[in-house]
Each structure stands twice: as C-alpha cells, then as structure tokens.
Image (cartoon, rainbow, N blue to C red):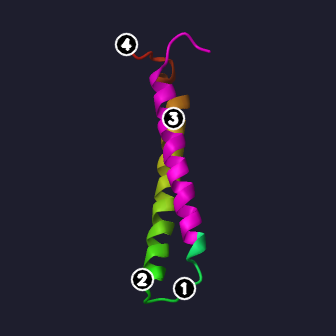
Amino acid sequence: MPETITWGHVLMLAGLLVGLFALLNLLRWLRQRDFTRGTPQYADGRLARRAALYGMAIAIVLFAGGGLTPLCELPIA
C-alpha cells in the first residue's frame, strides 16, 4: 500500500467508475438491440449505445491520464 494517495489514483478510480457506467449502458443496449426503428425501445437502445461508446472513450482517457502522466506521482496535499 502506498504511503500517500496520488492524483493518479483518483483519476484511475474515476476511469473505473466511468467504465462501469459504460458497461451498464452496453448491457442496456444489448437488451434492446432487436427493436425496429421508430419505437421508443429503439431510441433508448440507440442512446444507450452512444453512452456506452462515449463512456468507454472517457474511461480510457481517464485511466491513461492517471497512469501515464506526471499526475501519477503527485500526492494529494
């Protein structure tokens, strides 16, 4: 266990939480993928797919930012 918590830890934790959100949206999209165009279920599935893709992109950026930038060694004062 590190002595101090760094900003990199915070960013990685935020990336994991956003990734979990994206995973839940992916499951929501998979549940509603068989509906036809023009139905409310199709629109909900489309929004879930979009949220899953954006969420995964943001999660990757946050996780990489927490591990590959100088913030990974900067302690929280």
Which dot, 2 or 3, sits closer to the camera? 2
Mark 2 highlights which residue?
Answer: 40
What residue is drawn where x is 51% and y is 68%? 49
Three-letter amino acid code at the position of disc 2: Pro
Q: In front: 67, or 19?
A: 19
The residues colored magenta run: 1-29
Task: Tell me the distance, in whole angstroms, between the alpha carbons under discs 4 and 3.
Answer: 18 Å
Dot 1: within a 10 Å radius of its alpha carbon, few (fewer than 14), some, or many (20 or more) residues?
Answer: some
Real-space Cα distance between discs 2 and 1? 9 Å
* Residue 11 position in % (x across, y down): 47, 33
User: Which quadrant, please, contains the N terminus?
Assistant: top right
Specify whether residue 23 is painted magenta: yes
For label 3, the residue is 13
Mark toward the start of the polypeptide (3 vs 1): 3
Please name the residue that numbered disc 4 is placed on: 77
Magenta stretch: dominant SS? helix
